[in-house]
Amino acid sequence: MNPSSPNLGGHKRPPAVTLARLLWVILASVYFAVFVAAFPSSLAAYHELCRGDDCGLHQLTEQELVLLQEIGVSRDFYAGFFASSEALLLTWAALGVLIYLRRSHEWIGLLVSMALIAIGINMVSDNVSILAQRTPALAPLYITLNAIGASLVILLIFLFPDGRFVPDWARYLAIPFALLALADPLLVQVMPPMQSATGTVAKLAAGLAGLSIGGGTQIHRYRHHSSVEQRQQTKWVLLGFLALILVAVTWTIFTQVSPPPPGPGRLYFFLIGLPITLVLLLTLPISMTFSILRYRLFDIDIIIKRTLTYGTLTLAIVTTYFVAVVALQGAFRALTGQANQLAIVASTLLIAALFNPLRRRIQEAVNRRFFRGDYDAAQTLKSFGESVRDEVELASMQAALLATVQESMQPSYLSLWLRSESRRPASLAEDR
C-alpha cells in the first residue's frame, strides 16, 4: 500500500483514492450519528438508581445519592455531567477531520483519520456502549463499528508512518488479522459461546496478535528503514499509545478488576477520575496529529525526557510518602497505642528533603538509559573542562582535546589546526 500522489496541476485523482474518500465520509457520518444518538440513552441510564452491589458504571446507589445531595449536586446535574463529559471525545474526531482535510490524498492520512474517529467516539465511549445495551436492535451496529475500529488499529500498527508494509512479508500477517477483526459481527452470530462484551474472543485474539507482531515490525522499521523524520513521527505515536495503555489499564483495574464498593469513595472517584481520564486519553490523538502533519516533531525528545523523569519522580515520591506514613504510624501505635499526626509531618519533611536528590538521580538514569548520546556528550565535555581547567601547556591541551573528540565522536580521521603567531596556519593532525 503506497501513498497516492496529491491532486496537483489538474491531474485526476486515482479512482481508488476517490472511492476511499467517499467511504471515509460515509463511515464518519455513521460514527457521528451513533455518538449523538447515544446521549439521551446514557442520560436516562445515569438517572436510574441501582439496587444491590451490581451497579452499572457511574450509576448511583441510594446512599451515594444522599451524599451527592449533601454536597449540593442535583441528580440531574450528575446525570448530565457524565453524559456530556464525553463531548471531550469529539476532540478525537475533530483531529481526525483535520488530518483528513490535510492528508486525504495519502492512504496513511485516510487510515489515521478514520482510526481516530473510530477509537475516540465509539470504542472508548461509555455512552455508545450504554446505547447498545439498552437498545438491542443497535447492538449489531455497535459490534460492527467496533470491528472496523479494531481492524483499522491493526493496519495502522503495521503501516505507520509511511503507509508501506515493512518488511514486505508483514502484509501476509496484517491483512488476515485485520480481516479476522472485521469479520467479528459474523463470528458473533455463528459462534455465540465465544462472544465477549464487545465481540468475540477471536477478535480479541486477532487484536492482541496484531498489536504484538505489528509492534515488532515497528521496531524493525525504526532500526533499519526509518529516516530521522520518520523516527520522530514514531516517537510521537509511541508516546500517545503508552498514555492510552496506562489510562486503559488503570481504569480497568479500578472499574472492572477491583472496583470500589458503593459509597463516598466510589462517588468521588468517578466524579474526579472520569474528567481526568478523558483528558489523558487526548494524548494519543494529539500526538498522532503532530506526527502525521509533521508539526514540531523534534520537540518529542524533550517531552519524553520530562515525562519519564517527572512521572517516575511522582511515583517514587508518592510511594515513599505512603510507606513512610504507614511505617511511622505503626511505630507510634506500637509505642503509644494510638496514631499520631507527627507521622504525616515527618513524612512530609522527608519528601521535601528527598525531592531534589531523587530528581537528579532519576534524571541522570533517564538520560543514561534513553538518551545515551546526549548524556555521553555532556559528560565528556564536563570531564574535558575539568581536565584542562588548570592546564597551561599547549601540547597537553591539544592532546586532551583530541582524545575527548575521539572518545565522544569516534571519527576515522581527526585534525586540529592552529594559527601561529605569524598568522601562518600550522596544523596538528592525527589518524585515529
Image: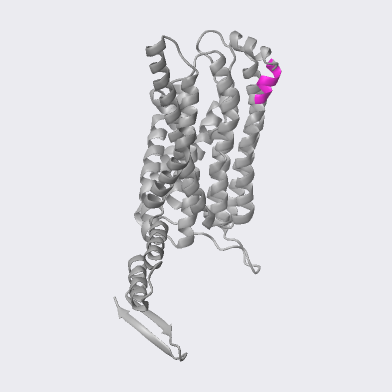
Residue 102, how many percent across, how many down? 62, 55
The question of residue 77 being in magenta is answered with yes
User: In this figure, which colouring scheme has been used for the structure?
Assistant: one colour
Percent coordinates x, y for residue 140 in the rendering: 53, 29
Image coords of residue 38 (percent x, y): 63, 27
Question: From where the camera sits, is residue 98 visible?
Answer: yes
Residue under the image location 59 percent in, 9 percent down: 63
How many discs appear? Answer: 0
Residue 136 seen anywhere in this rendered image of the structure:
no
Which quarter of the figure has residue 373? bottom left
Check if residue 106 falls in the magenta segment: no
**Nearest to the observer: residue 9 or residue 382:** 382
In terms of depth relative to the viewer, which is nearer, 328 or 1?
A: 328
Q: Does 272 sit above or below residue 371?
A: above
Residue sitting at x 38%, y 68%: 388
Q: Is residue 137 above or below residue 355?
A: above
Q: Main secondary structure of the magenta part?
A: helix
Taking the image as shown, residue 261 lies to the left or right of residue 327, namely right
From the viewer's side, name the closer residue of 49 and 20: 49
Q: Is residue 227 left or right of residue 110?
A: left
Instruction: Assign the C terminus to one quadrant of the image.
Output: bottom left
Which residue is pictured at 70% across the width and 20% down the height?
Answer: 77
Q: Is residue 330 left or right of residue 18?
A: left
Q: Quadrant of residue 222?
A: bottom left
Q: Which residues are magenta?
A: 75-81
- Residue at (54% x, 48% y) in the render: 287
**Residue 5 x/y as whole percent:** 56, 63
